[in-house]
Image (cartoon, grey):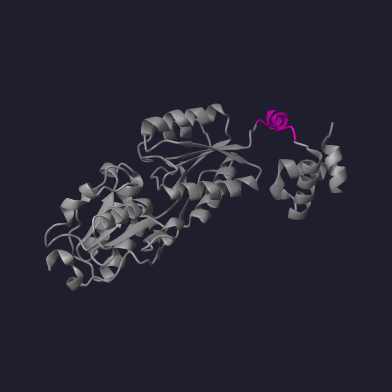
Amino acid sequence: MTDLKDVARLAGVSRATAARTFASPDQVRPTTREQVFSAARELGFRPNLLGRQLRLQTTQLIGVVVPNLLNPVFAEQFQAMERSARVRGYSLLLATTDYSSEREYSVVEELLRQRVDGLVLTVTDAESNSVLSSLNTEKTPFVLAYHQPGNPNYSAVSVDNRAGMAMATRYLLEAGHRRIGMVAGPALQSDRARLRYAGYCDAMHAYGLEPRAVIEMPAHTQAEFAAIEPFLQGIEAPTALVCSNDFLAISLIAELRRNAWNVPEQLSVMGFDGIALGTQMHPTLCSVVQPIALLASTVIDQLLAQIAGDAPISHCLPCHIRPGESTQPHQETLDARIQ
């Protein structure tokens, strides 16, 4: 039966180095790490992780909770986190909540039963969340992704959602638009959407304009033309729309074009997230870009620091606008609704 000593001999390293490679791969030189892993593959060797976990009281597992994987921002985040965690010797367990606060409790409990070492969470509302309160009381390490919680005991990594949407709205204002609306999911259930709406209002007020009520869609990432059609009539109809996330913006553009509305000639549309899919469509999506890869690696770094005993901290990352073909400067003569 192959053991660690055989792997070390074939890889040309000491037994201690081979053991360290499996236990903490990020602490070993890449060339050495590959030698050891290659020898293990050749010999069909797998380290006894269960025995190590029992000795160290750790599973090397991180639980990840996101609303869903239909929105590519969460899929991109998970992939980047998995890469970052893997080089640190950790694996990820994923659960989704479909934006249900009730389901958040059950999936977190299930992950804790799997004895995860810590949690990465994107919840519906971080400000009034009993799950987070319980985790904090129990001293369970966790980091919030995309949230900006008011509780200093909560660790979080995000962009400034309010400032980011204000920047998006100013981008349209500087392009000559004045009748700008915002599209979001049901009743602004997401705390991120509420902050983004506040940013939209900030920018409109700064230009002496009255913000409009949110144009509410039936789902966070899916637009319906019937829900927006009443707002597109008359001389006060918007010439530009900002959306609470990219996938909603992409769905909205599809609905508009399906109903013979030209984007951006008749209506400019802007998203928030900066997902890669937005660059592969026509028209390409103008968006506020969140640095998803940086956010993911920072989340993993902060969570592992907490697991090691550090105090919770939060990071607010920079965002920027990615220009796209879905917006253009406002020209009244192109406004088909008032010709």
Locate residue 206 relative to residue 313 in the image: left or right.
left
Total residue callouts: 0
- In the rendering, at what x and y percent does residue 113 appear? 54, 26
Whether residue 13 appears in this view of the structure is no
Tell me which secondary structure the magenta stretch mostly adopts.
Answer: helix
In this rendered view, identify the residue nearer to me: 161 or 22: 22
Occupied quadrant, residue 29? bottom right
Whether residue 80 appears in this view of the structure is yes
Tell me: residue 331, above or below residue 166: below
Residue 11 drawn in magenta: no
Task: Locate the N terminus by quadrant.
Answer: top right
Write the residue at 21% across / 47% down.
Answer: 226
Locate residue 292 relative to residue 9 in the image: left or right.
left
Occupied quadrant, residue 163? bottom left
In this rendered view, identify the residue nearer to me: 170 or 41: 41
Tell me: residue 111, above or below residue 276: above
Residue 51 drawn in magenta: yes
Tell me: residue 240, above or below residue 41: below
- In the rendering, at what x and y percent does residue 199 appear? 30, 56
Write the residue at 38% across / 35% down.
Answer: 129
Range drawn in magenta: 47-57
In this rendered view, identify the residue nearer to me: 262 or 150: 262
Write the residue at 42% across / 30% down.
Answer: 105
Seen as rendered, the residue at the extreme top is 113
- In the rendering, at what x and y percent does residue 5 appear? 86, 38
In this rendered view, identify the residue nearer to me: 155 or 62: 62
Task: Locate the C terminus by quadrant.
Answer: bottom left
- In the rendering, at what x and y percent does residue 17 appear? 81, 45
Occupied quadrant, residue 106? top left
